Amino acid sequence: MTHSLTIFTKTVNRSRAFLRIFDSHRGGPGRPSADEKELLRGALVFAVGALDAYLSDLIIEVVPGRSLASQPFREALKAIAKSDPGLALRVSLAGSPEASQDEFRVALTEWLDTKSWHGPTGVASALGFLACPVPWRDFDTVTGLDTAKELDRITTDRHDIVHRGGTPYIKRALAEESVTLVEGIARHVDKEVVAQFSLAKAS
């Protein structure tokens, strides 16, 4: 398990906290109150954000110190070099390989701050960047769902909530399903990346 997944697990568990608060607040049957509905929307928004952050963190964790063969990685190197012309000199003058990697990691982090890994396209792009493609049918086996379709749906709901102030009706079961879906995607990505790069399986 990567360190990125450890952080993701803590973050996505906060989505589950929204659900626990919802459950403890419910006084009985009937439609949820306005505030209770926001708890369910919050669980979904937090889960989608946790996956986005995980993919970015994973790239930062894995890429420095490795020469990846992916076209997205080569394009990223060009973009980073263009935005930070002094990087090559700083890397070459660093006192150790570890220091060189740290210099590159900082530049990569700054570049990734402008990127989003939302939705099926974002997941596929992150895996392409890492030269570790995973077919969607493999995710479907893990989640038991049409993973890309469901991720696209909850990502659309997330954008409606966050960017348009929308109030889509999120049922309790759907909110939990969204959190579970996101967690399944992240854990499968992590498993594939750990195997691809022979990373230590730290707990």
Image: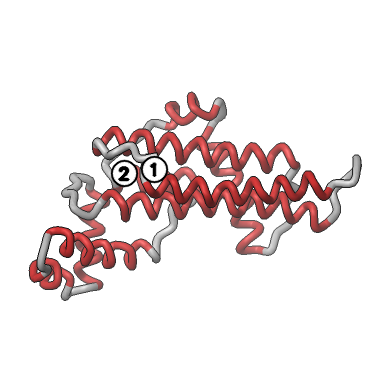
Residue at 24% x, 66% y is 80
68 above or below 193?
below
In the foreground, 137 or 194: 194
Residue at the spot of label 2: 128
Q: Amino acid at mark 2?
A: Gly
Q: In this figure, what is the number of numbered marks?
A: 2
Residue placed furthest toward the bottom: 86
**From the viewer's perspective, is 119 left or right of 29?**
left
**From the viewer's perspective, is 88 left or right of 52?**
left
Residue at the spot of label 1: 124
Residue at 80% x, 58% y is 35
Q: Point out the image quarter for the C terminus.
A: top left
Residue at 67% x, 54% y is 42
In the foreground, 142 or 128: 142
Residue 57 — which label?
Answer: none
Q: Point out the image quarter for the N terminus.
A: top left
In percent of width and height, residue 202 lies at: 35, 40
Tag 2–tag 1 contact (CB < 8 Å)? yes
Residue at 57% x, 49% y is 47
In percent of width and height, residue 179 lies at: 60, 42
**Circle 1 crowding by C-alpha within 10 Å: few under 14, some 14–19, many from 20:** some
